[in-house]
Amino acid sequence: MFDWQLFGDDVRKHGPALLAAGVVPGPPEGPFVEGRAYPLGVDIDGSTGAVSYAALNPYPDTAPGWWCVAVRFTLVDGVWHDGDQDDNSTTQQPFVRPVEIENSTSAWFDWHSNGGLGDYSERIGDPPRYRHMFFGIAPAGTARLTVTDETARARDLTVTPWCGAYVATVEGAFSRLTGYDGNGQQLGSFVCFDGPTSESDLGLSGMGEPVERLGNGVGEPIVSRQSSPPADD
């Protein structure tokens, strides 16, 4: 049985240092052990952050092998504290940056997964304050990723060079992920969100057209691909 206590101990011990550094060293060397947390990607946006980890065989009855687990962190009084997490199965070579995709309808990202939508309102009765996470892999041909939140604020995501991992924690109910090649040419863009809320309720009209779900059948994400390159924000 997967030792989630051991996994959590690894997250709490090493996560704050990864967020302070803003990069994930690696790749790790084996032998690899069930229950350990092997860092893949990192994201920092003000007082919130996220780290994605490779976990070996956490759900063998669902999909044996490697899974990706993304953990959200919050910075309080200068100290990073771990919080909620999301997971999905991933490539079985998580410590190698792929050249070709394994599990995607587009060539510029792979194994993309959306986390659940959470309401982080501080008091009962306050307007909902949504946050969401997503994570995946940028193949070797994807040199840069940006995320644009629902207020149209855009920022670069950190892509781990040796494995291509990306992870993001984003304010709001949805965001847009965009990829670029080494020449700055846009490779593609899609809107990510999760949950039962409709696109019209989220104000997504005009941002893209819904397409087939991505993923592996174990918690597939909902995405909407841009039908044409978006205008500059």
Image (cartoon, rainbow, N blue to C red):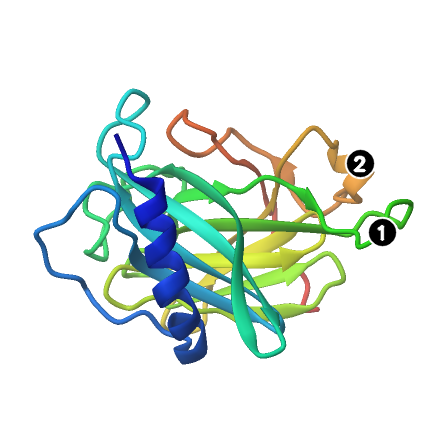
Which quadrant would residue 14 be assigned to in this image? bottom left
Which quadrant would residue 68 be assigned to in this image? top left
Residue at image location 33% in from the left, 22% down from the top: 62
First of labels 2, 1 by sequence position:
1
**Which amino acid is tagged 2?**
Ser
> Which circle, 2 or 1, is nearer the viewer?
1
Residue at image location 67% in from the left, 44% down from the top: 118
- Residue 136: image location, x then y, percent: 40, 49
Considering depth in this image, is 161 or 56 the residue closer to the camera? 56
- Residue 162: image location, x then y, percent: 23, 65
Q: Is residue 173 above or below residue 48?
A: above
Residue at image location 55% in from the left, 55% down from the top: 177
Q: Which residue is mark 1?
A: 123
Query: Could you tell whether 202 is left or right of 220 in the image?
Result: right
Crowd rating for badge 1 (residues with CA inside 10 Å; few <14, some 14–19, many 20+): few
The circle on residue 71 is: none
* Residue 187 seen in this snapshot: no
Residue at image location 39% in from the left, 74% down from the top: 17
Number of marks present in the image shown: 2
Kindly give the residue lying farthest to the right in the view shown. 125
